[in-house]
Image (cartoon, helix red, strand yellow):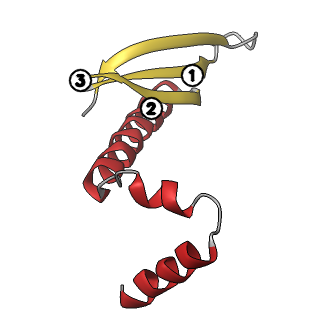
Amino acid sequence: MKKLSALLSVLLMVGVPGVAQALSMPSLERPVERSIHLVADNCYAVGQRLAQERGAKLLRADAVGSGECRVVMLVPDGEGGRPRREEIVVPMR
């Protein structure tokens, strides 16, 4: 941390553009970033499980609200024809 502070001090003295603005901006805390990734990972896992249960191909899985995921998959029609696109909202489990 001391090395970073020393480097930033030198950059400020030299006048590197953007350093002053970067230092004045509030930093994001790690728990916020981490929780976003965990939600996305959970929705993807839910989508994978649903697609596997239906013999479908997972196209997308996104968090859409408090504890819900939108899952988009291609489900085979069972008769050898073109698969249908299915989009459902399910609870994140």
Give the position of the N terminus as an image quadrant: bottom left
Name which of mark 3 and mark 1 comes first in the sequence.
3
**Three-letter residue code for mark 3:** Ser
Name which of mark 3 and mark 2 comes first in the sequence.
2
Give residue 42's position: percent from left, percent from top.
35, 41
Give the position of the C terminus as an image quadrant: top left
Q: CA distance from mark 3 to mark 2?
A: 17 Å
Whether residues under marks 2 and 1 lie with C-beta atoms below 8 angstroms apart, the answer is yes
Whether residues under marks 3 and 1 lie with C-beta atoms below 8 angstroms apart, the answer is no
Q: Residue furthest bottom?
A: 3
Above-or-below relation of 39 to 30: above
Residue in the picture at 53% in, 20% down: 72
Instruction: From the viewer's side, name the closer residue of 77 and 11.
Output: 11
Q: Quadrant of residue 40?
A: top left
Which residue in the structure is indicated by mark 1?
73
Residue in the picture at 48% in, 24% down: 54
Tell me the SS state at disc 3. Answer: loop
Q: CA distance from mark 2 to mark 1?
A: 8 Å
Q: Nearer the viewer, mark 3 or mark 2?
A: 3
**Three-letter residue code for mark 1:** Met
Whether residues under marks 3 and 2 lie with C-beta atoms below 8 angstroms apart, the answer is no
Give residue 92's position: percent from left, percent from top.
28, 30
Which residue in the structure is indicated by mark 3?
66
